[in-house]
Image: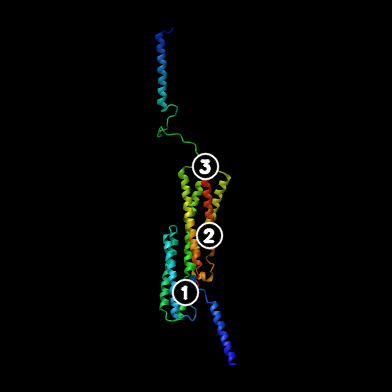
Amino acid sequence: MNRIVSTTLIGTTAVVALLAGSCAPAFADGTSTPAPAAGKSLSAIQAEAKIKTTARIGALNTAIAKVNAAQDITSADRTTILGTLNGDLAGMNTVEAKIAGDTTALTAAADYKTIFTTYRVYAVAIPQSRLAAAADRMTSTSIPRLTDAQSKLAAALAGPDASKSTPELQADLADMSAQIASATSALNGTAAQALAVTPSAFNSNHAVLQPVRSAIKAAIADLKKAAADGKTVLAAIK
Amino acid sequence: MIGRGGARIAIVAVAVAIVGASLTGCAHNGLGGRPAPAAGVNATTAAPAPATGSDDSSLQSVQNDLDSADSATTNAGGDVADADSSAATNDSP
């Protein structure tokens, strides 16, 4: 009887251990080191937390530099983006110091979790800042410049270069207008939509930024096609 | 009858009349064979040539617009690549 009980206990323990191992979350940042799990020592959790926060601080500083260097982000969006990135930067430093000062593994493990769930630096803050910047670049530069080019080319084919006008070139001009209109529509509100996403929204729906990403990629394709149309017409006129 | 002296006088009178008429015409038109320029227009201004195509500066302006748009769109593509790269990094505990 005692052997049976003992064997059952050992078996149960083995199964629990196996399940705990297989369900342990993947380590963030693409490294193979497992995340601190129950049973990790305080010092181990603190060491992993330091790695995680340091990596995020570096990524945030890079993202901030890019935002500061970008010329065609709107003033309002720049303010919002920098507010989020600098807020997360301060948050990383705060949580890193908090975990370093924790005195129990349980508290440290709970704090460790907030590095991810409270900030979502990689999943939300940096992607939303880059997507908003992309939308602003196209709205403030690509679309106005292509619209100007289309108008000038249309005027040329209707005036001094009328003798060079062909149905194909007129079709290119019409397509250029259509592509610009399509991109304008796709980008409408996308920067604001990207910047409105919060870590908590991501926690509820990991695909929350996907519609913004898709709209911006579609706009990029539209504007590349519009530019190609413009180059075709310009080459025919030259 | 007109004498030789009278004929000479007549020839001279015709010549004077021709030269006078010519000078009058030049004074009126400014340049022979061309209408007088309007007030404020330089007499050497050439008549505009028929349109044969957009000038170089107009074409360069279009090229600049297209280049500027290309640059911004390419940078936007870089922004999206940054976003995708970041989002691909595991951000869960």
Residue A82 visible within the image: no
Q: Could you tell me the amino acid type at mark 3?
A: Asp
Q: Circle 2 sits in a helix, a strand or a loop, which is it?
A: helix
The residue at 54%/42% (across/down) is A164
Q: Nearer the viewer, residue A2 or A50?
A: A2
CA separation in Å, label 2 and label 1:
31 Å
Q: Circle 1 sits in a helix, a strand or a loop, which is it?
A: helix
**Which image quarter: residue B41?**
top left
- Residue A156 at what x, y percent from top left? 51, 44
Residue occupied by mark 1: A114
Q: Are marks 3 and 2 on the same chain?
A: yes
Residue occupied by mark 2: A217
Subunit under mark 2:
A
- Residue A90 at what x, y percent from top left? 41, 70
- Residue A219 at what x, y percent from top left? 53, 57
Subunit under mark 3:
A
**Which image quarter: residue A70?**
bottom left
Asked if marks 3 and 2 touch (Cβ < 8 Å), the reply is no
Residue occupied by mark 3: A161
Q: Earlier in the sequence, mark 3 or mark 2?
A: 3
The residue at 46%/52% (across/down) is B68
